[in-house]
Image (tube, grey):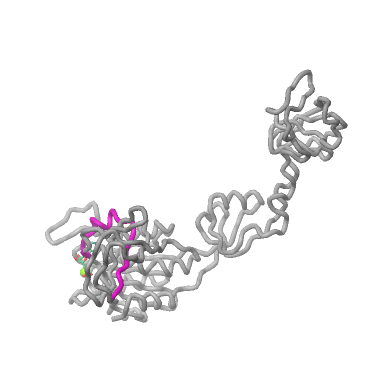
Amino acid sequence: MISVSEAKKQIIKHSKSPRVEEKLLSNALGFALAETLYAKMDTPPFNNSAMDGYAFSCALWDKKSSLTIIGEVQAGSNNNLKTGPNEAIRIFTGAPVPADVDTVIMQEKVNLEDGKITILDDGLFQGSNIRPKGSQTKKGDVALKKGQIITPAGISYLASMGFSKVKVYAKPKVSIIITGKELVKAGNKLKSAEIYESNGMGLTAGFRQMGIEPLSVALVDDVLESIEKAIQSQLSSDIILLTGGVSVGNYDLVPTALENCGVEKIFHKVKQKPGKPFYFGKTATSLIFALPGNPAAVMTCFYEYVTAPIDAFTQKKHLKSLTMRLKNDFNKKPGLTYFLKGKTIESEVEILDSQLSYMLNSFAVADCLITLEEEKTEFKKGDLVKVLMID
Ligand code: AMP
Ligand code: MG
């Protein structure tokens, strides 16, 4: 049996390299850029007005006279009007500023009478309220760096420069295989000894939390051939998750099925609670995680182990790790790392009740998993602990 830290190291070591794909900019939200993007053009592309107001040449103005309005320029129109000394042009936000004016005054700061404006702005300076061409980006500047996560504002920014496609790091193709003779899909009636299948639902939601839609969720009986068939059919996925049937019972057939399908075992069993029988293996194309079926063990192993290779593949950190002070005492046995459901309250973290691996009631209200290291047995209020945020 290996330690948690060794298991995590092995998973990172065998993680898949990122895959690059081109996406429509409109579909690129949340992806990490796989290329540095250079500005395709100056932005703004021309000098334009930042205000609804009046444009004039401050250089030619005598600083006392009112200014005669000689025309107007609207956003989207290209009226290159000429102005002389003490003349102004009505202008609107976003409209191109004619070549021989250097200043715009807000309409709220003038007095308009008989087609003339009197300027009532002491703070006005030459260049006021003009957004100069290229003041945001000059053509060829770095617009966004490789690795940047694309946000809604990032999409708007790139669209403003005329980008319509970008290269990003792809999301992994993920398949889920749920094993267990006793399992019944929600919506069906339970017969005696049956329970509702919940791991597939929880894992699907966990992937969706990371913006990944699993390709399939299969439910299979504890029959070797059925499990093998389900595995074979998903071997083109980047990540395959199985739940159940990975322990030492007579019907725990998943490790044998994986071996028969040509999966190379990297480790099986980790010194941890919950989820001791956790298995990790790989093929040339897939990473395979076989999680013990107890629902809390499934979600714990998912957050603690499956997110790291997803981060590496997508070049995006999905969950935050913190160090926090415990709000309550906790005693444990030595020899196993504990992952406990916790709830952060301001700067402290509380260990919740109901920590057993078949229980989800505390997990359902937890916002984090707390790691208590393998050898230490006594944890006191105020001790610093590692916390993985899962909300
Ligand atoms: P196993 O790992 O197959 O020995 O399962 C351990 C425990 O988890 C058993 O009590 C199973 O009934 C339960 N279990 C396994 N898979 C699921 C599932 N998909 N949904 C709900 N409970 C499950
Ligand atoms: Mg089972």
Q: Is residue 121 above or below residue 203?
A: above
Residue 326 quadrant: bottom left
The picture places residue 113, in percent across and down from the top left corner, at 76, 19
* Quadrant of the image containing the N terminus: bottom left
The picture places residue 277, in percent across and down from the top left corner, at 26, 75
94 vs 201, nearest the viewer: 94
- Where in the image, quadrant-wise, is ligand 2 located? bottom left
Q: Is residue 215 above or below residue 49?
A: below
Q: Is residue 8 visible?
A: yes
**Which residue is painted at 68% across and 50% down in the image?**
136
Residue 364 included in the magenta stretch of the image: yes
The picture places residue 246, in percent across and down from the top left corner, at 25, 74
Residue 318 quadrant: bottom left
**Which residue is painted at 73% across and 47% down in the image?**
45
Residue 214 quadrant: bottom left
49 vs 112, nearest the viewer: 112
The stretch in magenta equals 356-374
Residue 250 included in the magenta stretch of the image: no
Q: Is residue 192 above or below residue 96?
A: below
